[in-house]
Amino acid sequence: MSRLRYLTAGESHGPGLTAVLDGVPAGLRVDVAAVDAELGRRQRGHGRGARQSIEQDRVRVLGGVRHGRTTGAPLALFVANRDAANWGDVLAVEPPEEGGSAVEPVRVPRPGHADLGGALLYDLDDIRDVIERASARETAARVALGKALHVAARGVEGVGPGPIVERLRGQLGQRAGDVELVAEYLHDHDIACALAHPFFAVAAPLEPRHRRHLARLFPVWETRNGSRAAELNAPAAVYIDTHGGTGVAGSDDHAGVDIGRTWTQTPRAGDVREFLTHLREGRASAHGEQGSAAKWTHAALGLATGLWKTEGKTPAATLASAVLREMKTKGDQARFRKVGPGKFVAAK
């Protein structure tokens, strides 16, 4: 499977927003209702403006899906702008008629936006062209595309909740006490898998003989991770490079802040099964940006927002207070340490 590529088009107050995703394998299930639900979720929440009372976002699939499954062609989605009807000829495609009154140009850039940079880059007399793209409205196209891809990924057999996963969990649970039986079951059923964190510190650290045995049982290892620091991933990467095997990428992103930083690349695959075959047979490699201690802390704080409840109106401040309380009460046993005003890192 080649690396996915996406692009969006459309203006904030134009007819609508279009998103195109290239590189999607054939045969993945797409649930339009789930995409619509995520678009509705985007419209709710703190800080939403009056625009959300106008729009009722629904996605329209323009291409790449037939009978609920991807075809392998680029996936094209469209989200209409209801507010476009209120803007008349401001964003008309055709030039104004000769002698007609042109729309008043925008000359003053908004602070904190891309207006000034865009106007200078494209030598514009009217900043409206930049304003319409450098807009929060454009994120609706990204949400639609992201959720469509998320739903497609969950449509892969063995991914996400469902009877297949429950059966697999039960079978592996019965063999949990014997790693050889686990490996035998996975290989006998052609289930693609990768060994994660083989050098992770545990109560009884793995010795070289243990790793050699694991490498024979599981030839595919996670060697690159978008959340864990590069130095934590290096031992596994060096082992695969020197002893043989296949390295793939992972995320460890339980807070939803680093998804997509790393990816596993294989030769072109026509569908999911072919991609997994490439993975099982070692035709794969890990790519992307690795994590760091700072990113791990970011993820930990992201998780913390679901662990610490508060009635306050400033989540960032109340979260920082919760971290400080832990540091005060637990001392050296706290999970964080302060490095600056409002800045924390994971304690080593």
Image (cartoon, helix red, strand yellow):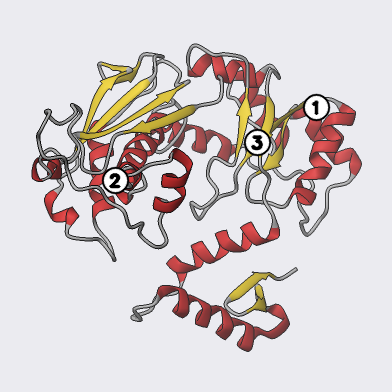
**What amino acid is found at the position of numbered circle 1 in the picture?**
Arg
Q: Nearer the viewer, residue 337 or 114?
A: 114
The dot on residue 249 is: 3
The residue singled out by tag 2 in the image is 128
**What amino acid is found at the position of numbered circle 3 in the picture?**
Ala
Image quadrant in which you'd find residue 217: top right
Q: Residue at x 35, y 59 (%)?
A: 110
- Please state if 288 lies on the left or on the right of 28 as rendered: right
Q: Indicate the position of residue 321 as horizontal and vertical percent values.
A: 51, 82
Mark 2 surroundings within 10 Å by alpha-carbon count, few (fewer than 14), some (14 through 19), many (20 or more): many
Assign a secondary structure to mark 3. strand
Q: CA distance from mark 1 to mark 2?
A: 61 Å
Image quadrant in which you'd find residue 65: top left
Above or below: residue 186 compared with residue 209: above
The dot on residue 216 is: 1
| Residue that lies at the very extreme toward the top in this rendered image | 270
Q: Residue at x 32, y 43 (%)?
A: 138
- Tell me the mark number nearer the camera, choosing from 1 and 2: 2
Q: Nearer the viewer, residue 124 or 90?
A: 124
Quarter holding the C terminus?
bottom right
The answer to whether the residue labelled 1 contacts the one labelled 3, judged by CB atoms less than 8 Å apart, is: no
Quarter holding the N terminus?
top right
Q: CA distance from mark 2 to mark 3?
A: 42 Å
Assign a secondary structure to mark 2. helix
Above or below: residue 110 compared with residue 31: below
- Please state if 152 lies on the left or on the right of 40 as rendered: right
Q: Residue at x 50, y 55 (%)?
A: 255
Above or below: residue 267 compared with residue 246: above
Q: CA distance from mark 1 to mark 3?
A: 19 Å
Q: Nearer the viewer, residue 188 or 25?
A: 25
Assign a secondary structure to mark 1. helix
- Tell me the mark number nearer the camera, choosing from 1 and 3: 3
